Amino acid sequence: MPTPLHTPRVNNNDDTVRLVKLLVKAGDAVRAGQLVAEVETDKANFTVESDRDGYVLAVEKALNDTIDVGSVLLWLGATADEAVPAFAAVGAPVESTTSTAPPTLKAAQLLAQHGLSASEVPASTGRLTVADVEAYLAAHPGNLANLQGSSITPNEPNASSPAIAAGSSEPLSPEERGMLRTVLWQRDEAVPGYVELAYDAKAWEQASTDYQKRERLLLSPLLALMAHRLARVAAQNRRLNSTIVAERRHAYSSVNLGFTIQSDTTLYLAVVQNAAALGCREFIERLGQLQRGALAHALRAADLTGATVSFSSMARWNVSRHVPVLPPHTAIIVAHAMSRDGIGTLGATYDHRVLTGYDALAALRAISTPEETI
Amino acid sequence: MTTHAVDMAAARDAIRAKVIDLASRTGTKKPTLSDDDLIPETGLLDSAAIMELIVWIETRFDIEIEQSDLTIENLGSVNSIVQYVGAHVRPMA
């Protein structure tokens, strides 16, 4: 899970320091002991080291900022694709306060599991959430002993439960941990809904075939063209390209298109950055690079982060329907399927906090036909 | 261009065998393929399998294939793949 690296106290008399050097940026891999920043007061300079191996998920402060001792300087994760707690992910300076509203049910369960009270944990919004408690626990290692069970509700079995038959325990791979976080984000934060639409696949197939012949492409561009259409639709309808942060809509400034790629047993969500601004051919080539990177298991951290809308197809396996899980901090993922009898289906899992079913359906309708000028 | 020498006859056999292997894995029973057949038009391989073939060619022959080179002319058939590989490696004398 994301772990904050806090601004150190340089001496007892200074409650603030100035950030004079930033030696890492989001996406960088770091080792324990590696210098990541330098801060100064009137009297002294002090270097800040990473306290663990991992990846920089987000940098919370800007160069030359005067920052409070103890505030979060940056977030570290075991893998590059971990979601930073929402209030940090978008860089919105939301004041942490102790909430007066009751914590969410899951937050209350987590508090109880760690013997904490709600008044001890700062809330990033008006109500204490699981993310707040997890961030607090990460910042207070003394409470970490039970953290691995933090997302397990009391009614679910855990490794020490007698309901679990004897066996061995093994760590998850980084990709499996990423999937676990994605699933838990949907469970704990989003309010998922699902709609779907049967569509006439002929128009898309014809457009794809025409484009492939015209451009002399080796690969069918069908899925890439459909994903590009989604990116353009999302650019026109900013609600699709949004999420909820601190009970406010956060509209992303660019459309970063997440695209699921199955490689052996690993499912990647590769991200085409600023996808709506790319022309069709540029988008197809960029997505092709990512697909090749995924097949070689050689994607970089930056290739796997920052999706704002997503597209997933299981047409290759002739499934008639699949209901994908929302990537964290996104409002919609479109699911494409094609049954053996040639019936095309477009579905969408959407975050009901951001979109209505009508919004999602309108998006699917728009995507169900190609633009006239591809 | 790689510096190691490549036996192009063996390369041709390996490429053909890889296409057949990928076709078998995507469900085609007893796939057949001539070296002139345009692979995308045979229906033997879908796009994901062709992408897998591309990654395999890069690894097998230690070459990098530019994204813009993914065209029918360059890599559409066993013959064109052999020709493309031959232009990017040092063929064995």
Image (tube, rainbow, N blue to C red):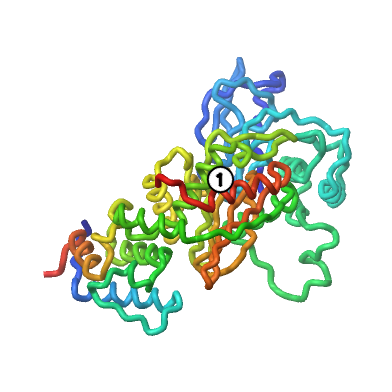
Q: Residue furthest top?
A: A42
| Label 1 Cα crowd, 10 Å radius (few <14 / some 14-19 / many 20+) | many
Q: Residue B66 at x, y = what percent?
A: 30, 52
Q: Residue furthest bottom?
A: B30
Q: Which of these two is toward me, A283 or A138?
A: A283
The quarter of the picture where residue A104 lies is top right
Vertical arrangement, residue A88 with respect to residue B1, above or below:
above
Local secondary structure at mark 1? loop
Q: Which of these two is toward me, B59 or A50?
A: B59
The quarter of the picture where residue B15 lies is bottom left
Q: Residue A160 at x, y = what percent?
A: 80, 66
Numbered circles on residues, count: 1
Instruction: Let me know if residue A223 appears in the view.
Output: yes
Q: Residue B55 at x, y = what percent?
A: 36, 62
The quarter of the picture where residue B60 lies is bottom left
Q: What residue type is labelled 1?
A: Ala
Is A159 placed left or right of A294 in the picture?
right
Q: Which of these two is toward me, A136 or A370?
A: A370
Residue shown at the point (37%, 60%) measured from the top left: A219
Q: Residue A88 at x, y = what percent?
A: 66, 36
Is B87 placed left or right of A60 in the picture?
left
Residue shown at the point (37%, 71%) measured from the top left: B43
Query: Disc 1: which chain?
Result: A
Residue shown at the point (73%, 47%) measured from the top left: A189
Is A275 placed left or right of B34 in the picture?
right
Vertical arrangement, residue A148 with respect to residue A135, above or below:
below
Vertical arrangement, residue A36 with respect to residue B78, above or below:
above
Instruction: Let me know if residue B65 appears in the view.
Output: no
Q: Which of these two is toward me, A185 or A117?
A: A185
Is A217 placed left or right of A178 in the picture?
left
Residue identified by numbered label 1:
A307
